[in-house]
Amino acid sequence: ALGPAISGPQGPPLSMEDAARHVHSRGTLALGGRFAGKSTRVIHSHAVIDRGSVFVAHLAFPVFSESEATAAVSALRRTCTGDVIDHAMSAWRVPKVGTVGSVGGGTNATKPAKPKKVKVASGFDDDGETRGGASIRAELNKRDAVGVACIVTRVYGGANLGKKRFEHIRERVRVLLSAAGLTPGTVASSDAFRGPGYSLGSGAGVAAA
């Protein structure tokens, strides 16, 4: 079980300190398969419950390629083995090969190097929840998160939630991105956790795929 439900705002991203209360646990995630021996950081959210439906998000980072991201998604789904869930929606967003670095600068000290715009590759899987995975990717795009893979599980409670379900999906993703302390537009790193007060906004610097 992932503990009691904690409600959260539907608006701007939280500070890292405020977002931390929405986190159930943090740890490492073994990827397995062709990435056997490799692991990433992982954060699991508390549940949000609405009319019997239960939403929980899981965020893995850093991941640096499509194959690594899909391996992380598979590993995240394995962590839910044994849980009663109806959908495990997912999305990922990683840098395209050869797009990370800087341009400009040179020997002129008055013109420092400018960040190179990072182009990204992304993907999603609705897993039977129409537009569920697309909603996760939309939040990753909005928050300019790069080098991450995320799933949101849902237990269907018997009542149709309409558009409200997308709000819950995106809100759970939002709080984990803020809790992770990732820098918008910058590829996630394993030491992304920062001090209280840091928040992930919608930065400019990544060209969405």
Image (cartoon, rainbow, N blue to C red):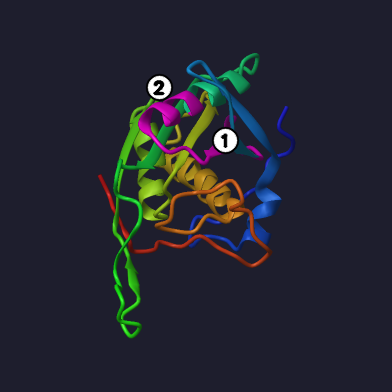
Q: Residue at x 68, y 64 (%)?
A: 196
Q: Nearer the viewer, residue 154 or 162?
A: 154
Instruction: Report how far apart the C-alphas of labels 2 and 1 lie in the structure.
Output: 15 Å
Which one is nearer the viewer's eye here, 188 or 137? 188
Residue 15 x %, y %:
60, 63
How many marks overall? 2
Instruction: Kindly state the secondary structure of the residue where label 2 is placed.
Output: loop
Q: Which residues are magenta?
A: 45-72
Residue 189, numbered label:
none
Is residue 48 something that shows in the picture?
no
Question: Relative to 30, is 42 above or below?
Answer: below
Which image quadrant is residue 121 in?
top left
Q: Is residue 53 covered in magenta?
A: yes
Q: Quadrant of the N terminus?
A: top right
Q: Which dot, 2 or 1, sits closer to the camera?
A: 1
In the rendered structure, which amino acid carries the disc numbered 2? Answer: Asp
Q: Tell me the residue at 49%/32% (across/down).
A: 151
